[in-house]
Amino acid sequence: MSLSLSAGRPELGALDVPLLVVALSAGARVEGPLAQLDTTLGGALSRTLDRRDFRAGRDETLHLSGASTGPKRVLLLGLGKPTDRTAAIRRAGAIAARQGAKMGAGELALYAGSLSAADVEAAVVGLSAGAWEYTDTKTPPPAEDRRAPLTAARILADDDAALQSGIASGSAIAEGHGLARTLGMMPGNLCTPDFLADTGRDIARRHGMKVTVLGRAEMEQLGMGSFLCVAQGTPQDPKLIALEYNGGAQGAAPVVLVGKGLCFDSGGISIKPAQGMEWMKFDMCGAAGVLGAMEAIARLGLKVNVVGLVGSTTNMPSGTAVKPGDVVKSMSGKFIEIINTDAEGRLVLADVLAYARRYKPAAVVDAATLTGACVIALGHTATGVMGNNAELVQEVIKAGTRAGEPGWELPMWDDFKELIKSDVADVKNSGGRPAGTITAALFLKEFADEYPWVHLDVAGTAYTESDLGTVPRGPTGIPVGTFVEVARGRAG
């Protein structure tokens, strides 16, 4: 269920709403609309701040009961001392919505002082993220135990133009995030390559895009031996999904977004440990990011040409599965030695990146939950960023920063290439543990040498195994925001 968003004037004292969330920076003063609210609360707000019962530290919360009139409940929410106010408002929006949902408020209003259009957009994205939940495969609790879901949110500010613009753009981006998170959270037996293909067809139908879906037979005709070797252990038909959004000038070179779509990754013959393997349903978050971004880009009506490519299959052990030591021929003609069948995502992407050449792209950005090494290097805070074009790398990093999805560049020095040299093929698919994220990117670079290209390793950021406060355990929506900002930055 999408969150219904609306705008309102910051008349806090007279506001009739189940929950008013007031986001405050450290050192905030009780003046203007806050003074009106303080009067309604009988001075409770000023007393709370004067006694320093609430200091507005980042993510700090304090609940105040409402008076006989005005908001029924007030939640004070700390922004801390933000260096990036827009990012702080996005975060506050997410926490506000999660708290509202826990309370069973049903509806809330958010006040964070003066807001620009970018601030409003950030608040909408945050609120929508915090309100999102996946209940498709859960039995509802008994009626007496249910709390009202958060279905509506009002953003309060004086600038009507900023409110309308920010709500419109934020809602478009939030829809993309919601789609990506839903696809990511779906169990692997439901979110299959066929389901991703159907999702792509639905996006294309609703937004007037061209869609192409290739199956095993079509990929065999194109010589996609790298992609298909991953799929040879599963009876499910692999899918290469292409969505073409033509919002820019006719014939203008498109931005191509590429996503890894492993709907489940057992590791294949190089099977993963049983503990935690259930998290490998999230190995399609790159693909979910592409589909979510295409949804958002179309809703935004960006004046730029964008192609979304998804390579989707499952990686399973079987009597027909690819084996360590096998050599396969990719679509580009290069031969690949399979060292580790659990390094499968790069094998899928190798042929999808080769397929991208037909679009004569202005830039290609791929995203993949590719390496555990990236989680070791950057934790769950930053996405690994690598590429063959320095300007594009910086463009993508800046786009991620604007979206609240920080990235960090890792080196692509030639010395690392020694680790993926093969004795029997042109390249091998794994260089072992040392510099694992970098060697994976260098492998991909072998198939992305005809255009500017950047690789995003989102293994540590696309989903979380712990509650982050802003989002619960599960998918985060990354890299939807980065993809959208790359496209928006190039829109006419």
Image (spheres, rainbow, N blue to C red):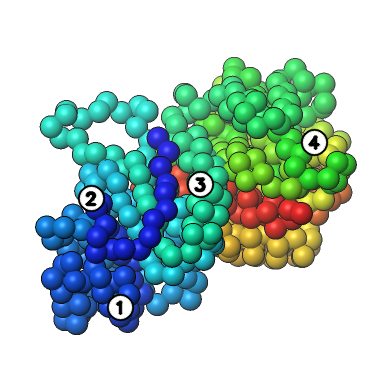
Q: Nearer the viewer, mark 2 or mark 4?
A: 2
Q: Position of residue 380 (x, y in %)?
A: 47, 58
Q: Is residue 364 left or right of residue 275?
A: right
Q: CA distance from mark 2 to mark 4?
A: 53 Å
Marked residue nearer the N-terminal end (2 or 1)? 2
Q: Which mark is residue 18?
A: 2
Q: Which residue is mark 4?
A: 355
Q: Which mark is residue 301?
A: none
Residue at the (77%, 65%) spot, across then down: 391
Q: Nearer the viewer, mark 1 or mark 4?
A: 1
**What amino acid is at disc 2?**
Pro
Residue 163 can be seen, yes or no:
yes
Q: Position of residue 334 (x, y in %)?
A: 84, 39
Q: Position of residue 284 (x, y in %)?
A: 55, 37
Q: Position of residue 336 (x, y in %)?
A: 77, 39
Q: CA distance from mark 1 to mark 4?
A: 59 Å
Q: Which residue is mark 1?
A: 31
Q: Is residue 329 above or below residue 360?
A: above
Marked residue nearer the N-terminal end (3 or 1)? 1
Q: Which residue is mark 3?
A: 171
